[in-house]
Image (spheres, coloured by chain):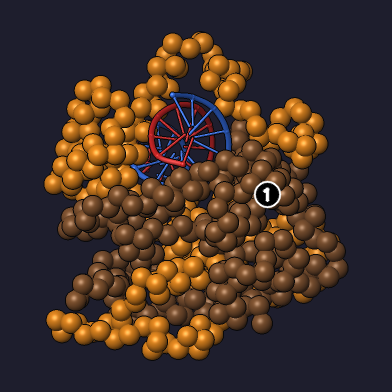
Chain colours: A brown, B orange, C blue, D red
Amino acid sequence: MEWENQHGEEEYLQYQIQNGVCGKVMSDEQVEELKKQIVAYSAISEQLAELHKSMSAHHDFTGIRFGNLYCDPISASVGHKITARQRWTPTPLQLQILENIYDQGTGTPSKQKIKEIASELAQHGPISETNVYNWFQNRRARSKRKFQVSTGSVNAESEPDVSTKEKKTKPVGLDFIDNFSHGVESFYFQGTESGIDQLIGKEESSRGYDPYNNLVEQFGLLG
Amino acid sequence: MEWENQHGEEEYLQYQIQNGVCGKVMSDEQVEELKKQIVAYSAISEQLAELHKSMSAHHDFTGIRFGNLYCDPISASVGHKITARQRWTPTPLQLQILENIYDQGTGTPSKQKIKEIASELAQHGPISETNVYNWFQNRRARSKRKFQVSTGSVNAESEPDVSTKEKKTKPVGLDFIDNFSHGVESFYFQGTESGIDQLIGKEESSRGYDPYNNLVEQFGLLG
DNA sequence: TCTCTATGAATGAACG
DNA sequence: CGTTCATTCATAGAGA
């Protein structure tokens, strides 16, 4: 559904300042649309989770999966990535785990911690301790740089200055979400990735409590 | 998926009337949560899609019951991807200014400088500090590259600029990688950034998209 | 439309 | 640690 196309980005969300409070405004229509999409997503994810579950029951599919993705990247991944890769690239799962750990607020992972993390992530793909270390360094650094918006988001035009998000979101983003992510607060989209494992309740290390599980549960995905 | 139920729609979104406009206002907090939820699904679906793909590769599993559970929902909804991501494009004037500044030789514009530049350029069109920052980064990098190429070896393909690469490619490898790549080339799965379309082998989407940056796109997948 | 190219942006790694 | 570099991904725009 050409959601944005129909409504037009600019109409979709607007900043609304009132009594010093800034929020996003959505029309009923828009809200409705949003809800529909979320529900759709939820439903699908649920089904997929089901699928995964039943599969895992038969095999340890994860192994195959990664074996496939890893050893046979040509068929499994983007397809033009046959060439040697120079730098580490976290798999979604790895990323998710990293983010979870990061969000747990346990500052800088100690050397020991990094070792642990690395070995755990190794189950989901190639990785080294250095990679983990760097990741945390970068994550923190870039997370910090999120504040530099000097009330500059005044520019009118059709392109609202969405402010400087450190990562993922593009400043001139046109899409709904970009606008959603209010100028000041940048949101890291990767930071909130949830994984199949969580959904399915698979064994996972960085579990216990984490904000994302909550979200997932809110969706009722896990049932 | 009982998003509304869990939170209560009215609690989540509230009507706000102002200047005769009626809409629903979300607090930053709410928005943040919404985003997380969306992202969660996005990521989940992506991963599941990967799963599915590799599964398909090993048709051992294709027989189970996901022909219904899995394939249907995705393939059915995949067709609705919304492509909306847009990126900043400097206006001729902005470009001109940027080039001038760049030519003044002042290496890296400090953060302060960037702010100034940004606000100046903002007079000529939408722009953010990040845009400025990126521009300089790219400008420098590409300028350098060009220089290298023009002065480099005649043929650059067989073993392109070892000098440059040598130091860049160091720590990727690890036991894991070495085991797999046999030390030859550490080529490994990199497609983690792919979106569902790519993972599943969707090919009809008009253009590429930004799977991990554009929530809406992924979100829209299921719309 | 499809392809190709220039370039904005993301990010792992390195540097001071 | 904060910055900067190098490399890659994705896209807007030009050309066929």
The residue positioned 51% from the left and 82% from the top of the image is B3
Instruction: Please tell me in which quadrant of the rendered image residue B76 appears.
Output: bottom right
What kind of residue is marked 1? Answer: Lys
Residue B89 appears in view: no
Left or right for A178, reference A81: left
Work out which residue is located at the far right of the displayed protein and give it. A58
Residue A162 in the image: above or below residue D13: below
Residue B193 appears in view: yes
Left or right for A129, reference A58: left
SS type, badge 1:
helix
- Where residue B12 appears, as percent x and y from the top left, is 40, 83
Which quadrant of the figure contains the C terminus of chain A?
bottom right
Instruction: Decide: few, some or many residues near mark 1? Use Cα within 10 Å; few <14, some 14-19, many ≥20.
Output: some
- Where residue A8 appears, as percent x and y from the top left, is 29, 68
- Where residue B187 appears, as percent x and y from the top left, is 69, 36
Which quadrant of the figure contains the N terminus of chain A?
bottom left
Name the residue carrying label 1.
A113
Left or right for B115, reference B182: left
Pick whichever, A105 or A90, lies toward us.
A105
Q: How many marks?
A: 1
The residue positioned 18% from the left and 55% from the top of the image is A155
Residue A148 in the image: above or below residue B110: below
Q: Chain ID for label 1? A: A
- Where residue A172 appears, as percent x and y from the top left, is 31, 53
The residue positioned 67% from the left and 69% from the top of the image is A208
The residue positioned 67% from the left and 61% from the top of the image is A206
